[in-house]
Amino acid sequence: LAAMDAILADQRAIRDEMRRLVMRLEDNERRIAALGGQGMGGGAPSPSRPQPTGRGSGGYRQSAGARNYQPPAQGASPPRVAASPGKPTEQKILASRQAVTTAIQDSTPADAWEEPAYQKVSPSAIDRCEQLLRQTFERRFAQRSRHNPVGAAMDFLKKYDVNRSGKLDQKEFIRCCYDLEFGTDEKTMLALFSRYDVDRSGFVTIDELGRMLFKQDGDTESKAKSSIATMREVLSLRAGGFASLQAMGRQWRIMDRDRSGVLSKEEFDIALDVFFKYYKIQFSAAQKNALYQFFDRDNTGGVSYDEFVRGVRGDMNDFRVGLVLQAFDILDRDRSGEISLGEIGQTYDLSAHPGVQSGKVSEREALNQFMSQWDKSGDGIVTKDEFIEAYNWVSASIDSDDYFELMMRNAWHISGGTGWSENTANRRVLVTHGDGSTEVVEIKNDLGLHLDDNQEIVRRLTQQGVRDIRRVDLYGEA
């Protein structure tokens, strides 16, 4: 019996290793396909291969998140099945720990597409700012705040709610902080505001701000939201953090033998302990209990791992979704609300794909590889929801709306933007008019445009309103 157990254990280990190697192989194939897209008519802007920005050395890094996400079937949601009673076996605990460890090891932080770390504020600096703000409130309203600190803070914050909405935006919060004179720079104040803005709406309710600032005993929701904010801060600060989180969700699916789609309390605690230990933070038992209650809203005794991973990641705000939809419209040529293989083929010259030129893949195969970045259901159609979901992972690592706007405009050649976020990727040409006058003009729709196709350049310039074109030269050339 002992010999049989040893053989079975060895088989399980071999299967686990094979599964991990297959996943790594598939991931490498996607990366090769994405890199191969560099020859597609001026590039293949996507969550897995951004365009250079021309903004110096702080270039973007690709996010493994967008190419690895595997959503459930369209319109479906993971079943909410109560976890089995009793504690998991030692073997299951070890498997859980291995799943999280593998997720961290298999993510590709060097490829993460996100802001440079120097532009971010560290969680410890945000903690100090929060502590100073709390202490300032306590000193300023010592008598009133002794028994009801949240109420005292809310009364003060209401003075800055100019439109009486019950919420504060960033500017109102900063004005409040300056008036309190607690000595922190504006960049850190904005980072603290982001910690409280858990839904990334750009607003924080006065009630929510007061509760999250003081985190009183018994307020499990505020404790959970503060913990989620801390997770986001540490994941955002380290390259590939959100890619690791997404990989963890993928590993949990592999482990989920009964396809229940849920984590028990013990598995949930293991995930937090092992995963975030890698990021040098540890959650108390009270914080873990608060988080579990927060995600297990219907009290089934289990937390959906999809719901947990997406809850930590969060979704884009309306401003970012608008930019992503502009990118979607560039590909959705027939305005059907879906992107087909044919539409992508019309946008990109697949004959320039290195794999096609070498004879390793056909144009159709190259097209399928490119489209697979978003078409996770494999039906040959990319919906708006699939496109947005991919960019939710890219967005998670980027704190600044301005940086996200610059990234999207340059990657997808979306004309416009102001100041720091202005598009710098679109081709500028020197137009000579019939009367001999000249002007430098930006081609507002130049994605996939061949620079030797003068007739198409003139057509696009005419389409955007440029008249009486006698000659077009690439800007800076005779």
Image (cartoon, rainbow, N blue to C red):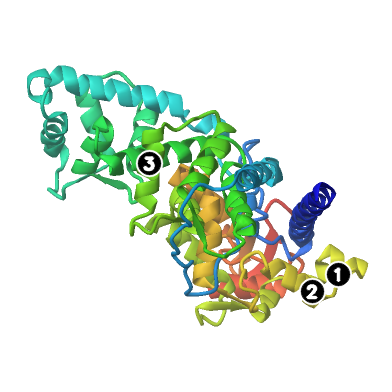
Within 10 Å of the Cα at label 2, are there few (<14), some (14-19), or many (20+) other Cα atoms? Answer: some
Q: Residue at 78% of width from left, 61% of height from top?
A: 39
As helix, strand or loop, the secondary structure at mark 1 comes to helix
Indicate the quadrant where residue 109 lies.
top right
Residues 168 and 144: in front is 144
Q: Position of residue 108 (x, y in %)?
A: 69, 44
Marks 3 and 2: which is nearer the front? 3
Q: Residues within 10 Å of mark 1 (few under 14, many from 20)?
A: some
Identify the mark nearer the N-term, 3 or 2.
3
Instruction: Determine the residue positioned at 64% across, 41% down.
Output: 59
Q: Position of residue 345 (x, y in %)?
A: 70, 76
Between 222 and 454, the one lying in front of the other is 222
Mark in front: 2 vs 1: 2
Q: Earlier in the sequence, mark 2 or mark 1?
A: 1
Judge depth for marks 1 and 3 and give the one in front. 3
For disc 3, the marked residue is 289
Q: In this view of the protein, can residue 183 be seen by the observer?
A: yes
Indicate which disc, 1 or 3, sits on the residue closer to the N terminus.
Answer: 3
Q: Which mark is residue 356?
A: 1
- Of residues 323 and 271, the one drawn nearer to the viewer in this rendering: 271
Amino acid type for the residue under numbered disc 3: Asn
Q: Quadrant of the C terminus?
A: bottom right
Horizontally, is 308 left or right of 445 in the view?
left
- For badge 2, the amino acid type reads Glu
What residue did someone put label 2 on? 365
